[in-house]
Amino acid sequence: MSRMRSLLQEFFKKGDMLLLGLCLAASAFGLVLIYSATRWDNDNRSFIVQCVAIAIGVAAYFILTFVDIELVTEKGWKWMLLFNAVLMLSLLTPYGVGKETTGNNSWLALPFLPFNIQPSEVAKIFFVLVMAWQCSRLQERGISRPYAVMELAGHTLLMCGLIAGVSGDFGSALVYLFLFVIIAWSAGVGKRWFFLGILLAGALF
């Protein structure tokens, strides 16, 4: 009991409670929307699945609070990147399925699991970890240098290309692009690069 109390005290000391609270508030809002959209047909499956996902997320946050993420990422970023690529390419196997309403082949229906997995959501975790590690490393040598920006943008474009090309889910690809903008902006990438990116996107589309 004392060990658990000690762990909880360390968790509240190390963990970002404001961030956790904001995430839980946003998740609660999402649960309300899901419940209101599905209660008419007495199907609570989606609501229950989301509740379980939130519980798993909180448990993962608790565990990761005690892990040196920077050390893990520094030594394992190549494996994380490879895992993300393999995970997305797995949608090309017979286990990759989609929804008739969207046409996106963005889910994995594995026979030994009672639920489907969306690889782009799982890969998002490792994408953010590797991107944060990249920013931390590049800040020491100047994160606004052309090489540094190309490295960050290259990682993002690789994931966006895999998601859009393999699953056809351009919405998820845009989420990755949005995450890149937030992380790069927070890390101090020069505003000129964002302006150049907007001009390039406008010229291409």
Image: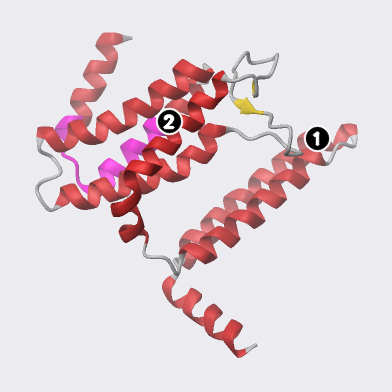
Name the foreground residue: 128 vs 39: 128
Q: Which residues are magenta?
A: 176-193
Name the foreground residue: 67 vs 50: 67
Residue 115 location in percent, x, y? 73, 37
Quadrant containing the C terminus is: top left
> Seen in the image, is 169 located left or right of residue 114?
left
Residue 27 location in percent, x, y? 62, 49
Identify residue for label 2: 85
Q: Which residue corresponds to the image point at 54% horizontal and 54% vertical from the top-left?
A: 23
Q: Is residue 173 magenta?
A: no
Residue 127 location in percent, x, y? 40, 41
**Badge 2 amino acid:** Ala
Question: Is any part of residue 181 visible from this angle?
Answer: yes
Q: Which residue corresponds to the image point at 47% horizontal and 79% vertical from the top-left?
A: 10
> Of the numbered discs in the image, which one, if any, rests on residue 38?
1
> Of the numbered discs in the image, which one, if any, rests on residue 113?
none
**Badge 1 amino acid:** Thr
- Helix, strand or loop: magenta stretch: helix
